[in-house]
Structure formats: structure tokens, C-alpha cells
Amino acid sequence: MFKHILVPVDGSETAQMAVGKASAMAKAFGSRVTVIYVIDPYPFTGVGTDFAYGQAEYLSAATAEANEAVKVAKQALLDAGVNVDSSVVEAHTAWRGIVEAGDSLQADLIVMGSHGRNALEKLVLGSVAQAVLSHTKLPVLVVRDSQHGKQT
């Protein structure tokens, strides 16, 4: 049914839960999985040398974070015996990078967490997940975090 599953990750616990769901589905359907992490190469604007230094520092940190998140997700899938590819994608918004990757990779399902590490996003479904749902033609399985709806 699903031959190619796209799993965007951001290093969050919810993204790892999505990796687990994608792994189970890939094993059930014999699917291959592609894990991506989207980096916004220009998250802020500025002028002069301070901006250039800040931009280089940001890209270095973002790339290191992306590589680690992809590595962890890829290893979990490999350990489960799932055929997996991975990449770090650049896009001006995370949702756009996910939607474009889904199209270009010819995925037939996106499995993603309901929100990542941004506290503001935790107030709603998640701005990235919501935008992906609004802009993609692919089916999307949104995995909610384990604490959603629980009272503490």
C-alpha cells in the first residue's frame, strides 16, 4: 500500500515516536523510508559582518543538530530492519521543505510528529504539521506526543 514513507525529524521525542510508527508501517507494507531534517538557511535578516558571523554560526549549529537527529532516526530504522535513506534539506520553512521533499521523492505517505521542540507550537497541533496537512496532496499520519491530553 505504501511503498515510500517520508519521515521528517527535528530531534524531538515526538519525532522519534513518528519514527517508531513509520518503522512499524514500513515493516508491515515492505516500504522504504526516507528520513529528512529541514534547515532554514536564512532564519533571520541582518546587515553587515555581525549578520555574516551569526549566519555562519547558525548554519554550523543547525547542520550539527540536523545530522545528529537524522543519525538517531536512521539508526532506529536500520535496527528494525527497515530500508532507509536520509538527508538534510534546506528550505525557507520546515513545512515547505517537507512538502517539496514528499513530491520530489515520490513518497506516498508522510509520518510526522504533531509538534517539535518549540513551546509555542505545543499550544496547537503544531504549526509545521498543520501547514504540511494544508499544503500536501499526500496522506499524512500525525503522531501526537505521549503527554498530550494527560493531566499532571
Image (tube, rainbow, N blue to C red):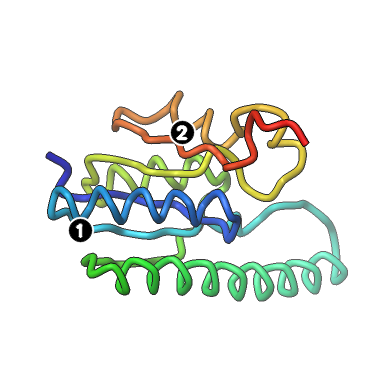
Q: From this view, report whether residue 142 is shown above or below residue 3.
A: above
The answer to whether 57 appears left or right of 88 in the picture is right
Q: CA distance from mark 1 to mark 2?
A: 21 Å
x then y, percent, for residue 24: 28, 52
Q: Nearer the viewer, residue 106 or 56?
A: 106
Of residue 101 and residue 121, the one placed in the foreground of this image is 121
The amino acid pointed to by label 1 is Arg
Q: Position of residue 138 (x, y in %)?
A: 29, 32
Where is residue 108 drawn, in percent x and y?
22, 40
The numbered dot on residue 135 is none
Badge 1 or badge 2: first in the primary sequence: 1
Task: Say what secondary structure mark 1 lies in.
Answer: strand
Residue at coordinates 63% horizontally, 34% vertically from top-left? Answer: 148
User: Callout 1 environment at 10 Å: few (<14), some (14 to 19), or many (20+)?
Assistant: many
Residue beneath label 1, please?
32
Q: Amino acid at mark 2?
A: Val
